Amino acid sequence: MVLVFKTSVQNKAEVAGLAPALNYLLNKRGIWNFDLEDCDHILRIESSSLQCEEIIRLMNGQGFFCAELEDTVVLNAVEQSMAAAYS
């Protein structure tokens, strides 16, 4: 399952600061990445066992805003990206 979150992470230094906590939480149960070029500063996590609440709690505990993006929002963003790529 892919979990997608809007975050307040702004730069690579903040991502590097979060890396140990995200790696510890995932503990070989998935992979994660940030898209800082997206206006929502997207965090994507692929995991079959994590719950959204765990990620939000971790991010908030590290001082960052984090909210799950609903499927419709994610699908619209993907459709817009695909349309832009093929136009």
Image (cartoon, helix red, strand yellow):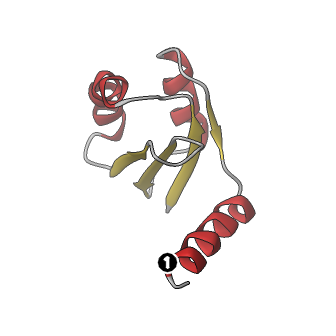
- Specify the quadrant of the image occupied by residue 82: bottom right
Residue 62, horizontal then vertical, whole percent: 47, 16
Secondary structure of the residue carrying tag 1 is helix
- Height in image: 13 above or below 47? above
Residue most extreme to the front: 87
The location of residue 74, given as percent across then percent down, is: 64, 61
Q: Nearer the viewer, residue 13 or 23?
A: 13
Q: Front-most of 68 and 73?
A: 73
Q: Identity of the amino acid at label 1?
A: Ala
* Image coords of residue 61 (percent x, y): 51, 16
Q: Is residue 58 above or below residue 46?
A: above
User: Which residue sits at x=74%, y=64%?
Assistant: 72
Which residue appears farthest toward the bottom when viewing the image?
86
| Circle 1 residue | 85
Q: Quadrant of residue 80?
A: bottom right
Q: How many numbered discs? A: 1
Q: Is residue 75 left or right of residue 51?
A: right
Question: For the point 27% across and 40% down, which residue is it?
Answer: 27
Residue visible at 53% across and 53% down? 3
Residue 85 placement, left or right of 74: left
- Picture quarter with the C terminus: bottom right
Residue at left offset 56%, top offset 75%: 84
The foreground one among 19 and 42 is: 42
4 w.r.t. 6: above or below = below
- x and y, in percent, of residue 38 in the image: 52, 49
Crowd band around label 1 with a 10 angstrom C-alpha radius: few (<14), some (14–19), many (20+): few
